Amino acid sequence: MDALSHLISGFGIALQPLNLGLAVFGVATGTFVGMLPGIGPINAIAILIPITFASGMPPESALILLVGIYYGSQYGNSISTILLNVPGTASAVVTAIDGHAMTKDGRAGQALAVSAVASFVGGTLSIFALVLLAPVLSNWAIRFGPAEYFALMVFAFSALSSFSGGSVVRALASTGFGLWLATIGLDPNSAIPRYTFGSIQLLDGMDFVVVTIGLFAVSEVFVLLSDTRMGEAAADVTGKAAIAWKELLATTWTMLRSAALGFGVGVLPGAGGTIASFLAYSTEERLAGESGDFGNGDIRGVAAPEAANNAAANGALIPLLTLGVPGSGTTAVLLGALLGLGITPGPLLLTEEPDLFWGLAASMYVGNAFLLLLNLPLVGVFVRALTLPRWVLIPGVSALAFVAVYAVNASSFDLLLMTGFGVVGFGMRRFGFPLAPVVLGLVLGPLMEKNLRRAMALSGGEVGVLFDSPIAVTLWILAFVSFIAPIGFRWARFRSTRG
Amino acid sequence: MKIADRSIGAALVVTGIAIAAAATTYRVGFMTDPVGPRALPYLTALMMGCAGALIFARPEASSSDLDRAAARRTGGAVLTFAGYALVLPLLGFFLSTALVILGLARLFGGPWRPSIASALSTAGALWLLFVALLQLPLPVGSLWMR
């Protein structure tokens, strides 16, 4: 089988000593940064990306490091969710229910262990599904023309705005802002400078790393400082992750079901991980019925969302890798990182750069395995870091982000710009504007514009070309439905509360 | 207090108009590019303008205001960050990084001496990571080069 031989050669790359070392380093730093209260995976990835850019390593190695960071930061997020009850993402909120209940019950070690194993199961099964599905979808996506791509991106924006749970109007403003940021700089077709305000530094456009770290990480520091309570979250530390085999085996079916569910939901654009973990949790709760103790520290209540969440995170890589279109904030950040490394994901990635794709698939297996190997024995070390006071942790991580941003272009202007975006991000958060659509707009903006212009050039300016093919029409309908869905739900709820 | 949303909505509408107005000057005459460099800016202007108008028309009550101490801490962090950008080329990597960590540690309520110790050791660790391990060129500081 072709895929198998490719995968084996992929492992050949992933298992080279340098790459193995990078996988370990990525998983460990990802776990550490993702674990810091309030930082969360998207910040961890954004902060650590510049290091992969600046170090000038070959793209396969950089990818392996990135994947390690991606997995590590998600597990790190679970650690602080379980121990401190501070979920860094919406999808970890479900884990907090039973995970933190277990901690209060003195069973933090079991919760951390089951979370690590469930993440591994969900992750590994979904990589397998990804390897099987990606070639199929790539073959299909090769038929996509510029009009279909344009419609697909509109769908991605619409889905992200409506499933993220907040106000659709505010998400629209955020998306518009992100797309506008994408137009800054020299227009690639006509070489006309747009919105540069006469600045030479802006001719190259907005640096994705600067915007992302500013919006997410820097604004997080401001949010933490503006919290009037400024209280220290007390870490209830239990030294190691340990669990009895019997207890773990009892969650087998929960993990398998949740992984399948999570993968299916994750492939769809929008807030895949959040919906996946909620669905998996409520499904298991219903299946357990009387035998369950959900909400009070049922171990299945940790296994289900963790397996689903990790499977969804890998499912979300499918549209990213085969279509080149991310469906979430985190995958948008990953796309930015890939483009920065000179890798353009899309249907041609598999045929033109099979080494990269299969190297990535193999490194995902390796990253997942290391996550389990490292975290089961070492979780105590990570957890001890949580007992360090905030005034040690947060300034250190901020400085890491700063130096990393500076190292990319060796420019103080970037640091000022990043601070400015931090202020903007702080304001956006305070007034309920979501940040993920900004990043998605910034990353997808150039692709969207390129495809729109190409489609219109091919048709000679005829707008109808955008709605010509069945695929494009389907995508436009999906985009429309997902945009009006929240309004419909709200109306239905309004009716049901009144009637 | 719906005043915040009213101002944000109005600001978004004004920004949208400004973006669109600037875009009218981006003219090209290529026959092969019927869309031109103006289409995406117009689209973003439309999105921000419409969202702004809706927010202005139907404002929601905003979250409570920052208290004085929180505002001072947040403002202090903004100045610390901006200051870092300015002093980095001058003082060099180690000293300015230690200073920014110290400033932030103080804002987060760290006591003086442990904060200084933490700033020096963290800056040292970052120096090891970036300069010794990753071999990235970081500024030495023009002040010491004379």
Image (spheres, coloured by chain):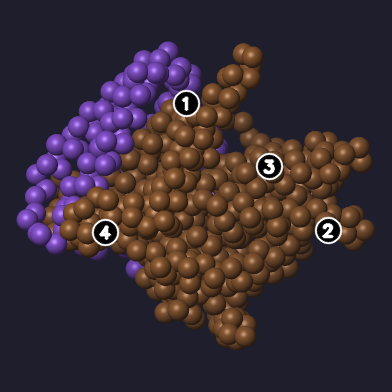
Chain colours: A brown, B purple
Q: What residue type is labelled 1?
A: Ala
Q: In which quarter of the image is the N terminus of chain A?
A: bottom right
Chain at tag 4: A
- Which residue is label 1 attached to? B70
Tell me the crowding category of disc 3: few under 14, some 14 to 19, or many 20 or more residues within 10 angstroms, Cα based: many
* Alpha carbon separation for disc pair 2 and 1: 47 Å
> A106 or A318: which is nearer to us?
A318
Chain at tag 3: A
* Alpha carbon separation for disc pair 3 and 1: 34 Å
* Alpha carbon separation for disc pair 4 and 1: 51 Å
Tell me the SS state at disc 2.
Answer: helix
- Which residue is label 4 attached to? A455
Chain at tag 2: A
Which label number is shown at residue A252?
2
* Alpha carbon separation for disc pair 2 and 3: 19 Å
Q: Can residue A110 be seen in this view?
A: yes
Chain at tag 1: B
Which label number is shown at residue A278?
3
The mark nearer the N terminus, 2 or 4, is 2
- For the residues beneath circles 2 and 3, the answer to whether they share a chain is yes
- Image height check: is B22 above or below A151? above
Is label 3 in contact with label 1 (beta carbons under 8 Å)? no
Name the side, left or right, on which A342 lies relative to A464.
right
- For the residues beneath circles 2 and 4, the answer to whether they share a chain is yes
Q: Where is residue B5 in the image (x, y as percent from the top left)?
A: 38, 21
* Alpha carbon separation for disc pair 2 and 4: 49 Å
Name the side, left or right, on which A49 lies relative to A289.
left
Is label 2 in contact with label 4 (beta carbons under 8 Å)? no
Q: Which amino acid does label 3 sit on?
A: Phe
The mark nearer the N terminus, 3 or 4, is 3
Is label 2 in contact with label 3 (beta carbons under 8 Å)? no
Q: Which amino acid does label 4 sit on?
A: Ala
